[in-house]
Structures are given as C-alpha cells and as structure tokens.
Image (spheres, helix red, strand yellow):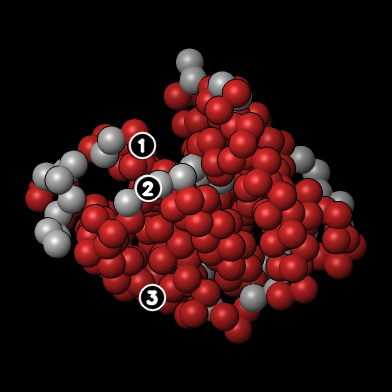
Amino acid sequence: MSFIPTEITSFFAITLIALSFVTSAFTASMGLGGGVAMLAVLGLGLPVTSVLPVHGVVQMGSNAGRVMIQRSYIVAPLLVWFTLGSLAGIAIGGSLVVNIPEKWAKASLALFILWSVYRKKPKTDIQQHGKIYFVVGGAVSSFFTMLVGSTGPLVAALLASTGLIRQPLVATHAVCMVIQHGLKILVFGMLGFAYAEWAPLLAAMIASGLAGTWVGTRTLDNLPEKTFRLGFKIVMTIVSLHMLWQIL
C-alpha cells in the first residue's frame, strides 16, 4: 500500500500533515476554526468525492485527541441527547441532502452562528436548556454536516449559549464532534468510500493533530476567560463571514 493516495502529490500530503498540527492546536486553544480551515485546504487538492470523508476522519482523530487530553472538563449529561439527535440528523441528511442547494445551507449556518454569538443571552445554566435543546441541536448540526462538512461552529454556538466556560466548552464540543464525525464516517463507508487507500496518510495526520492538540490545550489552560471569549467571538465571526463570502 502506497503512503500517498494516487489522487494527490507528495508535497500536498506533507502540507496536510503539517496543517493538521496547526489546525488542531488552534482548535484546542480557541474551541473551533481548525476544521473549517482544514476543509478549505482539502478542497484545493482533493477530488470532490474525497473531501468530506477524509475531512471526517481527520477531524474525528483531532477531536478524539482533545477528548483524551481534556476529558476531566467534559459535561457528560447532555451527550446522550446530542447523540440521539445526531442519529436522526445523519439519517435524514444522508437521504435528503442532495436536494438542498449548498449555498443556502451555508447561508443558513452562517446567519445562525452570527445570531447565536451576538444575541443577548439569558442568564441560565446548562441544565435549563433541557433535553429537547440538545436533541434538536444534534439533529440540525448533523443534518448539515452531510452537506457542508464542517459544522463545528454551529455546535460550538449551541454549547456557548448554555454559558459553559472555556475548558468545559472546548472539551464538550470535542466529544460532540467525535460523535458527529464518527456517524458521518460510517455513512460514507456504507456509500462505498475506500478508506483503506487513505489509511497511512490519515494516520500521519491524526498523529500530527494529536501533537497540535497537546500544544493548544496548554495555551487554553493559561488563557484568561475574558480573552478566550473575545477570541472565540472573533473566530466565530470570521468563519461565518467566510461562509457568506463563498456563496456570493
């Protein structure tokens, strides 16, 4: 088995391994942003049919690294309801997503993220959002991940609205993304994507991402909450505006 898939060059493969470190470090420190950047670069050098499956595996590996390193901060009660919603969203998205124009999906995501970040948030704790909130959030975000690939900002916006502080927000977001990407990988495998050909490169990218996650986590631990919130809002805004720019 060749280390480099036939669809890409050796230079691009090395670039992806390095990028996995950088994007994982950024995501671990700020909570999101790396997945969107990785998706954009994958789109430059991979066949369209390979972008979302490859992105799903790399992101699941990166987020799994965050889960291991930041596991003590995970807010576990909401995960059952998020998973139930994700199962429904993936099932519906896998069968209906081909009928939805990608530009409208991206516009909806971008506008929702901006609304979530800048709306005046009520002073409630995570328990007051209830089971339905996380079931619906899991379903909607998982539905859209089958179309646009990177819905990390949407999941982050859902979690941020509960009032979670930086470490629980980043750690719980990582678990949610592992769940979502894992289900997506399963669906693409059932649809016939040949993961075996990409296995060596994916393993190298995941290992590089794990190293980046460790570096980013050290940054997060030393980051003041106020600075994190400001950086989080800036990143969310840039990601949303980039989505809107893509459809113009």
Residue located at (45% from left, 24% from top): 246
Q: Position of residue 127 (x, y in %)?
A: 86, 67
Residue located at (71% from left, 68% from top): 79
Q: Residue furthest bottom?
A: 72
What secondary structure is found at the residue carrying circle 2? loop
The residue carrying mark 3 is: 214
The residue carrying mark 2 is: 193
Q: Position of residue 171 (x, y in %)?
A: 58, 70
| Neighbourhood count class around disc 2 (C-alpha, 10 Å): few under 14, some 14–19, many 20 upward | some
Residue 222: tell me if it is visible.
Answer: no
What secondary structure is found at the residue carrying circle 3? helix
- In the rendered structure, are the residues bearing label 1 and label 2 in contact, judged by CB atoms less than 8 Å apart? yes
- On screen, residue 122 above or below 171: above
The circle on residue 179 is none
- In the rendered structure, are the residues bearing label 1 and label 3 in contact, judged by CB atoms less than 8 Å apart? no
User: Which picture quadrant has residue 208?
Assistant: bottom left
Q: Earlier in the sequence, mark 1 or mark 3?
A: 1
The circle on residue 49 is 1
